[in-house]
Amino acid sequence: MSTESNSRENKSLQHATRRHFFSQCGIGLGAISLAQLMTENNVRAFDDNTNDPMRPKPPHFVPRAKRVIFLFMAGGPSQLEMFDYKPKLQEYNGQPIPASFIEGKRFAFMDSSHRIDLLGGRQAFAQHGQCGAWVSDLLPYTSKIVDELTILKTCQTDLFNHAPAKLFMNTGTGQFGRPCMGSWITYGLGSESQDLPGFVVLQSGPRGPRGGAVNWSSGALPTTYQGVPLRNQGDPILNLSNPAGITDQQQRELVDRVSQLNLKRLVETGDQEIATRINAYEMAYRMQHSAPELMDTAAETAETLELYGIKDPKESSYARNCLLARRLVERGVRFIQLYHTNWDHHGGPTENLEKHLPEICREIDQASAALVLDLKQRGLLDDTLVIWGGEFGRTPMGEVRESTGRNHHIEAFTMWMAGAGLKAGLTFGETDEFGFGPVGEKAHVRDIHATILHLLGLDHQKLSIRFQGLDLRLTGVEPARVLHELM
Amino acid sequence: MARALNRNASPATNYMRLLLPRHSQPRQTLTFRQPSFATLIVTSLLLCSSFACADEIDFDRQIRPILAKHCLACHGFDAHSRQADLRLDTREGALHSGSGDAIVPHDTQASQLLQRIQSQDAAMLMPPPEFGKPLDEEQKRLLARWIEAGADYAQHWAFQPLMAASSESGAKSATSDLIDHWVADAHQRMGLEFSPPASPATLLRRLCLDLTGLPPTLQEQDQFLASYATDPHGAYAATVERLLASSHYGERWGRWWLDQARYADSNGYSVDAPRQIWLFRDWVVAALNRDQPFDQFTIEQIAGDLLPNASESQKIATGFHRNTPHNEEGGIDVEQFRIESVVDRVATTGTVWLGLTIGCAQCHDHKFDPISQAEFYRLFAFFNQQDEPKLKVHWTSNPDPVTSPTEPTAEVTTLVMQERTERRPTHLLIKGDFTRPAEAVEPGTPAVLPSLSARGAIPDRLDLARWLVAPENPLTARVIVNRVWQVYFGRGLVESDSDFGLQGMSPTHPELLDAVAARWVEQGWGLKQLHRWIVMSRTYQQSSHVSKRQVELDPTNLWLSRQQRLRLDAELVRDAALVASGQLTTTIGGPPVFPPIPAGAMSLGQVNRPWKVSTGPDRFRRSLYTFTYRAVPPPMLNVFDAPDGVQACTRRLRSNTPLQALTLMNDAGFFEMAQSLAMRIESEGLEAAFRRCTSRLPTAEELAILAGLSPLDAARVLLNLDETISRE
C-alpha cells in the first residue's frame, strides 16, 4: 500500500479527530476517547495505554505490598552501636579478634588503618516492646516501634567499598549498567501515579550518595524507569517550572498546540511513538502542578509535623523527606528511595562514633519511626514495604584515627523492614559473640532482593530482560532465597 | 546463493524457505527480478504455524535456539556447571558424553534425550520443572524430527566465514543494489513490497541528520529541492557526497563510536573527579573525517603505541582503553580496581569488535558460547601488560600548520596506554576474584575463532589488534556493518547487536549482511563507503510512513518494507534545535564546554562539582562537546538516553518520557533557543521557522494551528514538536 493511499485513508479520520480534538483540548487528551476511530486506522487511541510503559501491570502473583520506601543510610551504619548488642565485645575491648574470624577475609583500608583489635560497643542497650528487641539509646524513637519492625541482623553483601557496595545493594551487582531495584519494580509493575514519576529519589545529609546517578539508573532498561530525584530546593524536579515570564495559560496553550500538531503527524505517519509523546506532554504538564503541591508540606497538620519532628516544614531535612515519602505513597508512586548521608564512621575528625554517630542517629531516628507510625495510622502500612539500612555495616574491630571508628563490614549487618504484612516484632538471624558473622540464617543482598520482589508479587526468576547475552535479573545468577520466615 | 522462489511450491513452503539457512538452499545465480506480489497472503502463511511443514530441519535456526535456551545452562560448554557429565553443545558430546545415549542418530526410541523431555515423571523430566523453562510440544516434536533425521549439528552462523557475493552477476552488482536485492527477496516471500520513496524534503533531512547529525539549513533545503526537481538521482548522490565530506560527519559518527568507547570526561565511581581525555575524542572525529580505514582505526586504538615509530596521534588513539572508570575512593585496594579495568577492557573489546559476551567468562566458562574461562584470561593477558601514563601534547585549536602556522599551542595531557618493560604474569582468577589466582596463562585468542599470528614468541596487543581485523575473522566486519546498519534503520540485521553468540538472534537477512561485510573488507574497510552503500539503496530511501497493511504483515519492520521513523539521539535533539534557532557554533574539537544546565543539577553526586556555564560561542557548541560527569550526567542528555560512559553502549535505547517534555518546554538552554527562533520568526516569518525545525513546508492546517501565537510561543511550539526531534 502506498503512502499516498495511506494518507487518503487517514483523511476522514483526521477531520473527525480534529473536530473531536478541538472540542476537548482544554481539558487535555486523557479525556478523549478515540478508540473506535483510531483502531480503524492502525492509530491507537490515547485511552488505550498499551503504549505507555508506566501503565500499571499485574504482578506474577497476589502481592503483599504495592509499593516500597527504602530509607538508604548511605555510608554504612554501625549495627554494633544501634541494633546488634554484643556484651562480649565490650568484655574483649582492645584485644585482637581471634585469627579464625578474619582469616582469608578482606576489608577496606587494609593497607593503612585496618586494625584487628576489637572495639567494645559504646552505647547502652535495652530490650524494648513486646518482642523484646535490643536497641541502643541512640534510637529512642525507633525503640518505641520495635513491635512494628522486622529486624534482620545477618545481612550480608559481597563488596566492601562504598560505591560498588551501593551499586550492589541497588542493582544486585557491583558492575555498572544494570537496572536498580526501583527500575526493576516500576518496569514490572508500572506506576499508579498519573502525575508523578513512578520511581522517586530524595536526598538529605551533607553530600550526595557516592556514585550519584548510577544508584538510581535504569541501566539496560529504558530511562523511563530511572529514578527521578526530587529536590528540596528550587524546582523539585529539574526543569519543572515554566521559564521566566511564561504563564500557566501559555504553558497549557503550548501543550495543546504541540499535541494538535503531533496528532496530525501521528495520523500522517502512523508512528505510535507520537501517541506516547502526546501523553508524555500531558503528564509533564500535570507534573508541573502536582509536584509543587506534593512538596507543600506546610499543608500538613501541626500534629503530623510534630510526629516527624519537623520544625520548619520548608527546610530540607531527612524528616521532611520521610514526610514526603508518605505523601508520595498516597499519590500512587511505586518506589521511593531516600538517601541520607553520611554514616561512614571511620574515626576521622568528622566521622567518629563518639560525636557524629549520635548526631546522625538523632537526624533519622524520630522521622523513621514517625513514617512507620504515620503510614500505619493512615492504613497504608499493610501494603507498603518500608526498608531501613545501608550498603554494609561496620567491623567489630575498631579503627583508631583521630578518634574512634569502625571499618566497613560485609559479613553481618542490620537492616529493618516494616509493613507489607511482614511478621512485626520478629528478629531474623543472629550473629556470633563479637557480631562478626552470622550464626545460622543469613540474609544476603540477593535474598533481600528476592524477598522484596516476592512481597510485591514478583518472582525474581521471572522478572528478567535479555541484555548482551544474559537474562538480566535483579538477583543475578547466584542462588537467591525468598525469606519466607519473615512473612 | 540466491534462494529463488519455487513457483510450484505452496506459499507456506516458500515462507519456510525464507527461514531456512542459506546452506540448505540450492545455490543459484543472483538475478534481479521484479518482486511478484499478491502470491502470498499472510493467512496462508499462518496456516503453517510451525516449521514442521518444511522437510529439512535447520539446526542453526530451529534446534540450536531450543538447546541454548532450555538445555545448555547445565549441559553446555561450561564444564563446571555441567550436569551428569553430559554436554549437548556439540554433536560429539550429545552422542558420547554422559551415559553415551542422550542422542542416538536416527533412533528416537533409543535417544535418552527424547525419553527425558517427554517423561511424565517429574523427577525424570528434562528440563527439570524447577528450572522454569519447560519445552512445549512443538519443540519436542522438532527435537524428535531432528534426531530422526540424523541429529546433524552445524557451526553457529556467526563463526562461519563470510559468504562473498560469489556468483558472477552478484559480484558485479553495485552494493546498494545487492542490499535492495536481498531486501526485495525477503519482501517477496512475505508478501511485502518497498514503500514509495520518501518526499525530497524528508530525504534531505534524513540524509543530513544521519550523516552529519545536523538538519539542513533553509538554504540547503532550497538548493536541494531545486536540483532534485530536475535530477533526483544526481541531486541525491551529490548531497550524499557533500555530507560525507563535511567535517560534521566525523562529529556525528564520532559520537557513535564514543558510545562504544565508553567515553566521558570524569573518573566515575564516587569521587568522579574530572579527567582530561578529550584529545582521544578529537582523534576519533578526525580519523572518521579522513576516512581512516576501519582496520587501521582499530589497530591504532588497541595498540597504536606498539606500531613502529608510533606517532603522537597513534598514541592518543590508545586512549580508547583508558576510558575505563577509575575508583578514587579511600580504602580501596588499588590492584582490585586495576584488575577491574583490565576486565572491562577485555569485555569491551569482545562486545565492540567481536559482538561476543566474552565478559561472561570472567568467573566461569561461558554458559552458552565456546569461550572458556582460561580463554578469557588469555585475552586478559594482552591487557595486563600496560602502564597507564598521561601523554603531554602540544595542542592547537587549528590542527593545520599550513593554514595557521602561528596558531599558539597549549600543553595538554591525555590518557594513553603504554607497554610495560617488565611483563606481569597473568593467572586465571577463580570466580573472577583477584585474591584467588590459579594457573598462569599466556596471551591468546579463543579457539573457536581463526588463530592469531604473532610477531614474536609471545603475542602482544598489536598482534591482537591485527587479529581483530584480519580478513578471516568472521565477526568484526559483520558486527560493525550491523552496528552501522542499526543506526539507519533503528535495528540491526542482527537485533542482538552485541551478542552474535549462540544466544543471540539470527540475522533477518543473512546474505545481505555477509555480502556487505565481505565487500567492505575486500574494498578496504572504508566507513564512508559503507555509509554510501546504505544511503544510496532504495531500501534506505523509502518512506517511513506506516500503512495498515504493513502493521499487520510486519508490525516491527523486521523486513524493511519501509524506513523507520526515529527519535533523534540526545545530542542531536539539542544540536538540531541549535541549528533551527540559528545559534549553533560549528567549531570542531577542543576542551569540553559547559552549556546551561538546570540549577541544582550538579548537587546530586557525592561531590558537588562546579559547572561554570560557558559564555560566548562555547555555549552553543554541539552536544558532543558537553562536559560529561559520569556520576552526574548532563540532565538534558541523560533524559534523552545518552549513555553515561560507565560501560560500552552499542545501542541506545529510545525512551519517550514526561521528563523529556519538561526539558524541551522549560530547560534554560531550550528557552534561549526558543527566544532566538522567535527573533527569526519576526524577521523571516512562521513558515521559514517551521522549515528550520522540520525541514519541510507546513500545511495550511498546520499554520492555522500556530496562528495567533506570539513569536515566542510559536517558537516554543515548533521546538517541542515530535517531528522536530525526529528523523522520518
Image (cartoon, coloured by chain):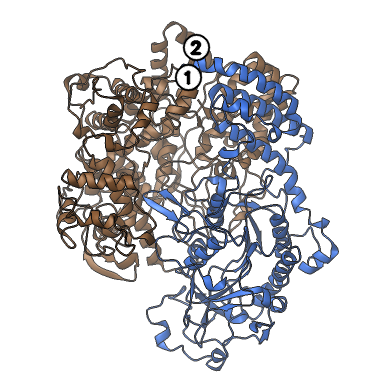
Chain colours: A blue, B brown
Q: Residue B373 — which label? A: none
For residue B675, say whether it is visible: yes
The mark nearer the N terminus, 2 or 1, is: 1
Q: Badge 1 sits on which subunit?
A: B
Residue for badge 1? B204
**Image quarter of the N terminus of chain B:** top left
Using residue B620 as the reference point, say whether residue B24 is left or right of it: left
**At 40% from the left edge and 43% from the top edge, which residue is drawn?**
B650
Label 1 element class? helix
- Is residue B723 visible in the rendered structure shown here? no
Which residue in the rendered view is the most extreme toward the bottom?
Answer: A91
**Mark 2 — on which chain does it sit?**
B
Dot 2 amino acid type: Leu
Place of residue A442 in the rendered image (x, y in percent of width and height, measured from the top left) = 48, 75
Q: Which class describes the residues within 10 Å of circle 1: few (<14), some (14-19), or many (20+)?
A: many
Q: Residue at x 39, y 26 (%)?
A: B42
Residue marked by disc 2: B225
Residues packed near mark 2 inside 10 Å, few (<14), some (14 to 19) or many (20 plus):
some
Image vertical order of residue B54 relative to residue A73, above or below: above
Tell if the residue under mark 2 belongs to the same chain as the one under mark 1.
Answer: yes
The image quadrant that residue A146 belongs to is bottom right
Depth order, front residue of B300/A253: A253
The answer to whether mark 2 and mark 1 are in CB contact below 8 A is yes
What residue sits 59% from the left and 29% below the top?
A: B722
